[in-house]
Image: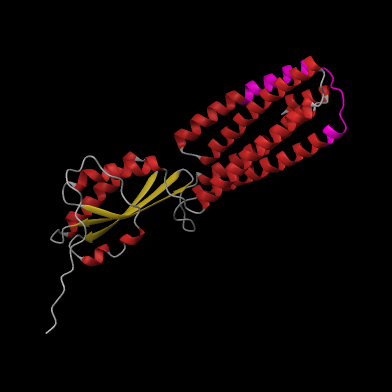
Amino acid sequence: MGLKVWSYELTGSVSLFSDAAESSVNLVAALMALWMLSLAARPPDRDHSFGHSKAEYFSSGLEGTLVILAAVSIAIAALERLIHPQPLQQISVGMGLSFLAAAINGAVAYLLLRAGRRLRSITLRADAHHLLTDVWTSVGMIAGLFCVKVTGWTLLDPLMALLVALNIATVGVKLLRETANALMDGVLPEADQTLIWNTLARYQNQGIQFHALRTRVAGTRSFISFHVLVPGTWSVKQGHDLCEELELSLMRTLPGSHVMTHLEPLDDPASWADTMLDRPAPPLASLEDPPPGPPEKRSVPKE
């Protein structure tokens, strides 16, 4: 941020001002992210039995809002410079400082993105994508300043700033949408749901059925619940052992997940009464025969 402010002071370029403004947002967002990540890492307590992992969404929501505000301020400054153009100074020095700042941001963004994917953290991924946007913004600024230096057309500077503002606003809206979806308990990604069904498929060949699969994401944690339908002749211990095995298998498949199962008798029609909320299972190539449906209800003739 210091390098970009310095380059703006030297050149008077509104596009470099927009780059510095976005870096200011990055600084505030990073401090907020550090605070929320430390809060999200706390273990469950009596008041928060599911943990504190949703604290991450405060950070991503704030970052999205700040990004949009930065885009608005950049657009206002660029429009003013379009109306009242000014010559630029020391363009070469400003380009060099901006390039150095972009290289630093690119390295940090790469490390954050790797950590965010490994730890399944929306906060780290949001910060990484924001920094990557900052890198491409700087590249665009350098290209625009080079064109100004070659052509002498100073209007290119505010026009580039307006393009940057539009790009930044798009990133901010995307962050807010992702945050809102998570706060509304959005389901796990399709790839994770496929892993769940593929894990359960191994047991369907044994005559075990599953339904009422529900998933949600809360920061770095995933929550999975479903009903397990077993033959009614099974003992409680048999059903319990199966549920334990299923839960451990899914937790190994999706680290960081919390799995809850509900045992039901396969041959009881009441067990199938809540299937209206099911998410349909994808076709499983490992199954030789389609899974049986609920048992037919036999009508009793009236006397």
Question: Residues in magenta?
Answer: 80-105
The main secondary structure of the magenta stretch is helix
Where residue 78 sits in the image (x, y, percent)? 79, 34
Tell whether 280 sits left or right of 80.
left
Q: Is residue 102 rendered magenta in the image? A: yes
Q: Is residue 21 above or below residue 57?
A: above
Quadrant holding the C terminus: bottom left
Where residue 208 sits in the image (x, y, percent)? 19, 52
Where residue 137 sits in the image (x, y, percent)? 67, 28
Where residue 188 sits in the image (x, y, percent)? 42, 46
Residue farthest to the bottom, as pictured: 303
Q: Is residue 78 above or below residue 177?
A: above
User: What residue appears at the point 81 percent right and 21 percent down from the top-left corner?
Assistant: 153
Q: Is residue 23 above or below residue 215?
A: above
Is residue 215 visible in the rendered structure shown here? yes
Q: Quadrant of residue 96?
A: top right
